[in-house]
Amino acid sequence: MDPNPLLITGFMPFGGEDRNPSWEAVNALPDRIGAWKLHKLLLPVEYGRAAALAFEKALACHADAVICVGLAAGRTAVTPEVMGVNVRDASMPDNAGYRAEGEPISADGPAAYFSTLPVRAMTKAVADAGIPASLSYTAGTYVCNDLLYTLLDRFSGTRTRVAFVHIPLERTLPLPDSIRALTAAIEAI
Ligand code: PCA
């Protein structure tokens, strides 16, 4: 059987860091995992633009599933996100210098969307691989949430399913563990 296309994205560095483990981990994944053929994309940490680039690439590769990965610096576990909310609000500007102060992502969109991939099963698979994992009910209100919400909005009612996974800093969770975690999560979908 032909493998199913899966788009997996990571982010560029932000907040003065020189690496973002989300892209380091995504980039280190093999091109095939189980029934999936991986298409990888590095995204800028910019409201709107990250989501637009991911959407375009998902269409171009006919993705059946999209998994976006980002860094959550304060977290100690790998955290698949349950939902994206219709808010941009962060004291830190994005990498284009834009600072969002409590505005909607989509003026007439719903308050939130639930992820359309099985995030609970993904979380269990990561934990079963021996890596700290828990479900998260907030992807924040910065660029990661912007990306998740917008993709769920664009792919609402289509066959393309979407999820977001936050990973910790490399000094909290070594990169090889994040790579194993993403592999286990993909095998679970
Ligand atoms: N983490 C940020 C944006 C880019 C990233 O890796 C976030 O959680 O919103």
Image (tube, rainbow, N blue to C red):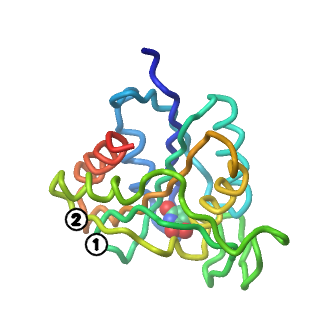
Q: Is residue 45 left or right of residue 74?
A: right
On screen, 24 above or below 90? above
Q: How many marks?
A: 2
Q: Which residue is drawn at the image coordinates 15% and 56% (left, top)?
A: 130
Q: Quadrant of residue 64?
A: top right
Figure quadrant of the N terminus = top left
User: Residue 113: x and y, percent?
Assistant: 62, 65
Q: Which residue is mark 1?
A: 76
Q: Which residue is mark 2?
A: 132
Could you classify mark 1 by the number of other residues whose Cα lies within 10 Å: few (under 14), some (14-19), or many (20 or more)?
some
Farthest residue to the right: give it: 108
Could you tell me if residue 144 is visible in this image?
yes
User: Residue 20: x and y, percent?
Assistant: 44, 57
Q: Which mark is residue 142?
A: none
Q: Considering the numbered disc 1 on the image, is that residue within a helix, a strand or a loop?
A: loop
Farthest residue to the left: give it: 130
